[in-house]
Image: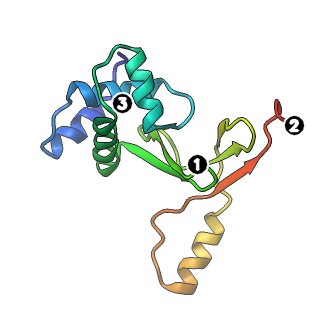
Amino acid sequence: MLKLEPNIKKNLRATGRRMTRTRQAVLSLLQKTRQPVSATEIFERLHQEKVAIDLVTVYRTVHVLKELGLVLQLDLHQEGLSRYELKEGRKHHHHIRCQICGQIEDLLLCPLKKVTKLIEQQTQFIVDDHTLEFTGLCPQCQ
């Protein structure tokens, strides 16, 4: 398994939780995965690696890791399922998903910074998060 960032372990300890084998396995998988993955994909990949885990435990684990701010949950509208990616060391970003093959790419920019400020001025809300999903055709599927 890959070495996890010390901040992750510290964050777990600060909330009275331990770094269990299950959490270590899920975090390690997310750390080496290039694209956001679903709970089912996490389960299948860990099963291939001979990690003894069931799907319910995967769901519970990603839920806890999300609550702790260690994992981002992406609810991609077109797919109707949640995908997860490690938050540690990543800047705010959006995604684009191919409508044919399902490939997901990170968009390392946020075109909504000015819009967010306008929304805050207009509504008196403090915007703490937003999501933006793009879909299209990747170069291989065009």
Q: Residue at x 82, y 34 (%)?
A: 141
Residue 125's place in the image compared with 48, above or below, is below
- Residue 86 placement, left or right of 8: right
- The residue closer to the viewer here, 36 or 50, is 50
Q: Position of residue 60 (x, y in %)?
A: 28, 43
Residues at marks 2 and 1 touching, judged by CB atoms closer than 8 Å: no
Q: Residue at x 51, y 49 (%)?
A: 81
* Quarter residue 61 falls in: top left
Q: Residue farthest to the right? A: 142
Q: Tell me the residue that label 2 is attached to.
A: 142
Q: Tell me the residue that label 1 is attached to.
A: 93
Q: Tell me the residue that label 3 is attached to.
A: 27
Mark 3 residue element: helix
Three-letter code, disc 1: His
Three-letter code, disc 2: Gln
Q: Quadrant of the N terminus?
A: top left
Residue 67's place in the image compared with 59, above or below, is below
Q: Position of residue 137 (x, y in %)?
A: 80, 42
